[in-house]
Image: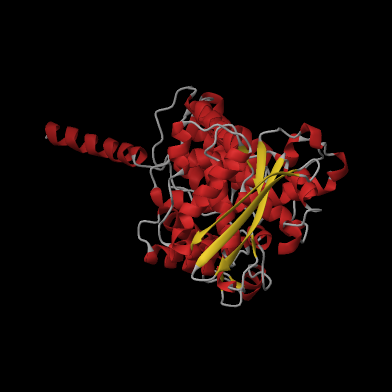
């Protein structure tokens, strides 16, 4: 009897304790509040919790998310940075921090932290989407810098441009075959890629040139005009400009001319010419690059020479389709760009750059919206109202700036895929420094190297969505 009573008492007192132990945690309650949009209550709970646990990265992150949802971006960014200091492997915090900087139009920081997220996360499906978003943001950054350079044009000092900077303009098609027009950008892209392998040179990225050309409303003939060259060089922050033309000869032969001009004076610094069979296009391009380098009296190391000799594909048709993809992407027509890149891959399955570009174009299409055969863009969001569909649809014949500015909300950040146990460390700082150094090594600052006013942002990007929490 006594034994039975003891068992009864044990059960009576144990059941409530069991329910208490299985109840929701403070983090779970706060997460539910955030999902319900009750951000003020979440902030109050986490503020109280942090009094007793001031260095709990999870509590700080929940507090940061609540501030982020309330568009209190300054406070949110400080808190997310604190999370990364305490838990250097929290990829979700890195993503949120990037989205916070994106919301405040700090393109440099947004891109840096999106890249940090890519380094931290194990979730490959999100990597591809983030990489595509970086490209879209970078285009918008280049557009903003083009506007800034034009606004400050009178104050830009050509004498301050580093002597080792060079920009490659689009080549003009002077032949009769319009189907070769895509080579205007494709050839320029190849030369940029090859000259970027010369350590003594700083090469302006093609996207920067593209955004400036669009901002100035320059036509194809204007780009190669002798009078335009000095101005372009000044605005691009390039001491030298490479420009040229190509035309088809009889019997499937191609002739390519190239000139290197000085931005300060517009004078021709070097010139070269090369011709041969279209089938040998890639050999011709390499010969042209080496001649340009020789004319500029640059001595190459064996390593640099071998790197330049690498070719992306041996299939001319594949490269022509890839070049078409570049043009479509510049216009913000990602559906057509994806199709062109895909055709390049079908023609040459080993064309790795075409594969990467196809994946990026597909992801960009998902972010921005699909484009019709006429270049119209259509929203890819499902179950949206007519009003939302209208706001997500861009004008006809949209340019890259239209595509960038119609950037829809960021995909919801995934749960942390590899969050560490915490503890202060310098890993994140080192990663960010590496990212910044990589950017500085490959991107020409252009107008940013001059004293200039704050960036004139083109239009407001729709803010990233407040993601659900696990």
Q: Quadrant of the N terminus?
A: top left
Type of colouring: secondary structure
Quarter occupied by residue 163: top right
Between 298 and 433, the residue placed more toward the observer is 298
| Residue 363, x across and y down, in percent | 49, 59
**Total numbered badges shown on the rendered structure:** 0
Residue reaching furthest to the bottom: 374
* Residue 433 locus on image (x, y percent): 55, 29
| Left or right, residue 20 beside residue 202 | left
Quarter of the image holding residue 416? top left
Residue 116 left/right relative to 417: right
* Relative depth, front residue between 122 and 149: 149
Whether residue 97 is visible = no
Q: Is residue 401 above or below residue 9?
A: below
Residue 354 in view: yes
Residue at x-position 67% and y-position 42%: 106
Residue located 40% across and 31% down the image: 420
Residue in the picture at 43% in, 46% down:
310
Tell me the residue at 45%/48% (across/down).
127
Q: Nearer the viewer, residue 207 or 8?
A: 207
- The quadrant where residue 107 appears: top right
In the image, residue 32 sits, relative to residue 363, either above or below, namely above
Residue 450 x/y as whole percent = 78, 35
Q: Compared with residue 379, is residue 49 higher up or lower down, i.e. above or below? A: above
Report x, y in % for residue 307: 45, 40
Residue that sits furthest to the right in the current view: 154
């Amino acid at each position: 009897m006594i034994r039975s009573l003891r068992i009864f008492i044990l059960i009576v007192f144990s059941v409530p304790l069991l329910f208490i132990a299985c109840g929701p945690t403070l983090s779970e309650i706060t997460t539910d509040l955030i999902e319900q949009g009750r951000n003020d209550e979440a902030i109050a709970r986490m503020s109280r919790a942090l009094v007793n646990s001031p260095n709990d990265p999870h509590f700080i992150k929940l507090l940061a998310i609540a501030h982020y949802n309330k568009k209190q971006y300054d406070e949110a960014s400080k808190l997310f940075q604190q999370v990364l200091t305490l838990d250097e492997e929290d990829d979700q915090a890195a993503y949120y921090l990037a989205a916070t900087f994106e919301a405040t139009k700090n393109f440099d920081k947004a891109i840096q932290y999106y890249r940090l997220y890519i380094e931290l996360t194990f979730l490959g499906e999100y990597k591809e989407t983030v990489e595509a978003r970086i490209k879209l943001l970078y285009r918008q950054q280049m557009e903003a810098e083009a506007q800034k350079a034009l606004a400050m044009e009178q104050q830009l000092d050509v004498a301050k441009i580093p002597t080792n900077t060079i920009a490659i303009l689009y080549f003009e098609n002077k032949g009769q075959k319009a189907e070769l027009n895509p080579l205007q950008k494709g050839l320029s892209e190849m030369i940029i890629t090859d000259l970027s392998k010369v350590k003594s040179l700083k090469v302006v990225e093609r996207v920067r040139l593209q955004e400036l050309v669009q901002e100035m409303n320059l036509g194809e003939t204007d780009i190669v005009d002798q009078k335009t060259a000095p101005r372009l060089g000044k605005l691009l922050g390039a001491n030298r400009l490479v420009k040229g033309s190509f035309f088809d000869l009889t019997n499937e032969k191609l002739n390519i001319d190239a000139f290197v001009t000085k931005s300060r004076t517009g004078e021709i610094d070097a010139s070269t010419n090369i011709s041969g069979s279209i089938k040998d296009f890639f050999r011709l391009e390499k010969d042209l690059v080496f001649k340009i380098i020789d004319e500029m009296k640059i001595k190459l190391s064996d390593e640099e020479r071998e790197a330049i000799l690498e070719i992306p594909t041996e299939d001319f048709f594949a490269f022509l389709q890839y070049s078409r993809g570049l043009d479509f992407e510049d216009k913000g027509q990602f559906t057509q760009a994806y199709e062109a890149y895909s055709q390049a891959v079908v023609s040459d399955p080993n064309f790795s750059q075409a594969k990467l570009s196809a994946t990026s174009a597909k992801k960009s299409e998902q972010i921005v919206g699909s484009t019709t055969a006429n270049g119209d863009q259509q929203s890819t969001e499902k179950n949206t109202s007519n009003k939302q569909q209208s706001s997500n649809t861009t004008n006809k014949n949209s340019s890259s700036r239209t595509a960038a500015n119609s950037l829809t909300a960021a995909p919801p950040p995934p749960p942390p895929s590899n969050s560490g146990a915490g503890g202060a460390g310098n890993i994140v700082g080192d990663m960010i420094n590496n990212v910044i150094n990589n950017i500085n090594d490959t991107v020409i600052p252009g107008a940013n190297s001059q004293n200039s006013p704050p960036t004139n942002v083109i239009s407001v990007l729709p803010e990233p969505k407040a993601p659900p929490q696990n």
